[in-house]
Image (tube, helix red, strand yellow):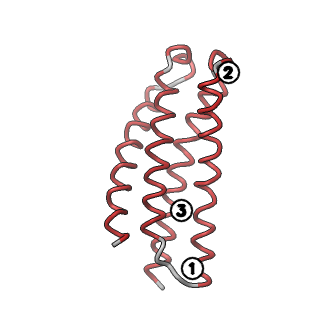
Amino acid sequence: MEKDIIIIVITVILATFYVSVSSIGIDIYNKCNQLKTSEKWKNIHKILSHTLVIAMTIPGVLFTRYLVGDGRLMGGMGILYGILGIIGSSIAYALYNESACKEHTKESQGNYLIGAIAGSVITTIGSGFLVR
């Protein structure tokens, strides 16, 4: 029981981390009018928006599973967050590097996104050990 609560708390932390990553990408897209004419960046904006909803939903699902039992999905959820993090941070970093939007970005955002990519890879690998 106590282990399940700890894993749910970790999942909430991962969700918070992903929300911040995708929010940076969405914010850059919203501020940069040059990107809004590109079909590529419109689709990427949609990906970030949809994965943001997924990331916010997972902790609620896990908490519900905790209330009704069966907490064996935690490693799988960690892998899911890791993959979402890799995709979302890579997309947000691509938005950050887009030359048309440099006036809307901060160096700290780029540094955060690089750390997010690395953290997501580590989360994916680490969660793989929990699935066993």
Relative to 67, does residue 53 appear above or below in the rendering? above
Residues packed near mark 2 inside 10 Å, few (<14), some (14 to 19) or many (20 plus): some
At x 38%, y 36%, the residue is 114
Q: Do the residues labelled 3 and 1 touch (CB within 8 Å)?
A: no
Relative to 87, does residue 72 appear above or below in the rendering? below
Pick whichever of labels 2 and 1 is earlier in the sequence.
2
Between 85 and 1, the one nearer to me in the picture: 85
At x 31%, y 66%, the residue is 129
Residue behind mark 2: 36
Quarter of the image for residue 131 reads bottom left
At x 67%, y 21%, the residue is 36
Residue type at mark 2 is Lys
Residue behind mark 3: 12
Residue behind mark 1: 66
Q: Are marks 2 and 1 in contact (CB under 8 Å)?
A: no
| Secondary structure at numbered mark 2 | helix
**Mark 3 vs mark 1, CA separation in Å:** 14 Å
Pick whichever of labels 3 and 1 is earlier in the sequence.
3
Between 79 and 59, the one nearer to me in the picture: 79
Q: Quadrant of the C terminus?
A: bottom left
**Residue 102 placed where, x, y %?**
51, 17
Residue type at mark 3 is Val
Q: In this view, does 64 lie to the left or right of 98?
A: right
